[in-house]
Image (tube, grey):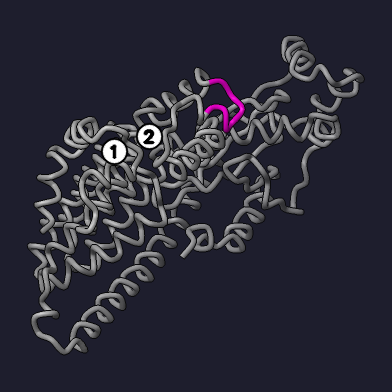
């Protein structure tokens, strides 16, 4: 289920329309990029705003202000007050679900003080594209002046209202997710009952679980949300079946998995301090859980937050270039590629690409290439028909001895030792 679809925008719009009528303030819902997707007819933009937005760069200035305000409100998780690029006082109330920012509510078209000559001087500096300063100043002088305490109170009312709406949606989400978990487990049990061979039914379940666990952590490190989520679903079902639903064991294994996932998220580019705080909060939540489905729900929630806070976040600066570089590496890791090859593919300098990787992934391009190769080697090791030498060559290493050295550095054991542990 898409988180955005959970948010009842029609209900939220009704709330904001009533708020707008009661306060006389203009209200808009904007996404993370500052783009409006909810404007209301109850209170239109003031004449000053309409005048500024009619200029060539007016709408772009508004959007940039809204985007910055949304980011700050999400960061601090509270209403954020600021002056827009046209000089007006505005505030943003964050809209987030499961720790993921969806956008904000922008409220504006007032002043907190009576305009003076310094205000008008700054207004001219902020809006150099305006030719008729007299008209701009006349319209600014018509803006309502609202006491800061009243403005703060209005912000607090909206913040509480939005929070309650998000909590309601989280309850809906949890019910949907726990139902899905129950259905998956029931299907898995039915499939196993249909198997004829008792030995095949038992199989080597725990070995399969550990193998799936390695894949799951690998996808977290690489930032592959779809595959990480898919592997997590299978992992949780296998865990339930293997433990026959024993909650104490499930809780222990879930805690272990969460700790390993947190480390994988940090290796994938998430901020260590943030990840540790999220992990502590998760552990507090599962200590209060009474049902197995609750353990699973909170585990999935934690992983999704990890992935949204790690390297491939949509709103990270230069994400497009880094994403293209990552895709190129994933497609060509088996070849003899270097940073120059990746940079040439993107038509940027190697030094610029190196800076981007440092900023976004906290590693060098060569480190990332090596990480991908080792992760792919781990998968190929599961194929007994391939020798260590063949695996080494398949993932782009020219020297088997160098491959063994790098593999041991990342995995902790030599390739041959790892291969023997799988049998």
Start-end of magenta stretch: 343-349
Q: Looking at the rendering, which quadrant does residue 241 occupy? A: bottom left
**For discs 1 and 2, the disc positioned in front in the rendered view:** 2
Task: Locate the C terminus and report the quarter of the image it occupies.
Answer: bottom left
Residue 391: horizontal and vertical position, in percent?
27, 46
Q: Left or right: 404 with respect to 226?
A: left
Residue in view at x 35 percent, y 62 percent: 230
Q: Looking at the rendering, which quadrant does residue 321 occupy? A: top right
Residue 398: horizontal and vertical position, in percent?
31, 33
Residue 139: horizontal and vertical position, in percent?
84, 28
Q: Left or right: 179 with respect to 214?
A: right
Structural crowding at the residue carrying mark 2, measured as other residues with C-alpha within 10 Å and reported as few (<14), some (14–19) or many (≥20):
many
Q: Left or right: 389 with respect to 101?
A: left
Residue in view at x 44 percent, y 34 percent: 75
Q: Looking at the rendering, which quadrant does residue 32 occupy? A: top right
Above/below status of 251 relative to 371: below
User: How many marks do you count on the picture?
Assistant: 2
Badge 1 marks a residue whose secondary structure is helix
Which residue is identified by label 2? 369
Residue 157 visible from this viewpoint: no
Q: Which mark is residue 275?
A: 1
Residue 124 visible from this viewpoint: yes
Q: Which mark is residue 87?
A: none
Q: Say whether residue 4 is magenta.
A: no
């Amino acid at each position: 289920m898409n988180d955005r679809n959970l948010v009842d925008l029609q209900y939220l719009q009704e709330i904001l329309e009533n708020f707008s009528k009661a306060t006389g303030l203009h209200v808009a819902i904007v996404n993370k990029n500052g783009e409006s997707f909810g404007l209301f007819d109850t209170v239109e933009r003031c004449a000053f705003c309409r005048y500024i937005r009619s200029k060539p760069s007016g709408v772009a200035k508004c959007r940039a202000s809204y985007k910055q305000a949304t980011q700050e409100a999400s960061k601090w998780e509270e209403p954020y007050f600021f002056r827009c690029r046209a000089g007006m006082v505005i505030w943003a109330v964050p809209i987030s679900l499961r720790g993921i920012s969806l956008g904000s509510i922008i409220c504006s078209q007032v002043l907190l003080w009576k305009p003076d000559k310094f205000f008008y001087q700054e207004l001219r500096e902020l809006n150099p594209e305006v030719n008729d300063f007299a008209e701009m100043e006349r319209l600014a002088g018509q803006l309502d002046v609202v006491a800061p305490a009243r403005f703060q109170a209005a912000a607090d009312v909206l913040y509480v209202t939005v929070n309650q709406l998000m909590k309601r949606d989280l309850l809906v989400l949890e019910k949907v997710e726990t139902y899905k978990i129950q259905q998956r487990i029931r299907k898995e049990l039915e499939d196993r009952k249909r198997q004829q061979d008792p030995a095949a039914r038992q199989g080597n379940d725990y070995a399969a679980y550990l193998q799936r666990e390695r894949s799951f952590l690998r996808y977290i490190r690489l930032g592959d949300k779809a595959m990480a989520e898919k592997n997590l679903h299978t992992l949780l079902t296998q865990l339930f079946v293997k433990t026959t639903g024993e909650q104490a064991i499930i809780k222990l294994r879930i805690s272990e998995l969460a700790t390993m996932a947190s480390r994988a998220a940090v290796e994938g580019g998430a901020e260590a301090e943030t990840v540790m705080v999220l992990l502590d909060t998760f552990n507090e939540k599962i200590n209060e859980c009474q049902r197995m489905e609750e353990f699973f729900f909170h585990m999935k929630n934690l992983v999704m937050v990890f992935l949204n806070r790690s390297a491939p976040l949509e709103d990270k600066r230069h994400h497009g270039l880094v994403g293209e570089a990552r895709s190129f590496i994933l497609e060509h890791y088996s070849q003899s590629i270097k940073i120059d090859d990746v940079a040439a593919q993107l038509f940027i300098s190697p030094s610029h690409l190196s800076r981007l990787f440092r900023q976004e992934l906290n590693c060098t391009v060569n480190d990332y290439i090596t990480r991908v190769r080792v992760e792919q080697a781990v998968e190929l090791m599961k194929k007994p028909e391939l020798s260590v030498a063949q695996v080494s060559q398949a993932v782009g290493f020219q020297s088997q001895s160098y491959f063994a050295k790098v593999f041991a550095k990342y995995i902790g054991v030599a390739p041959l030792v790892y291969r023997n542990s799988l049998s």
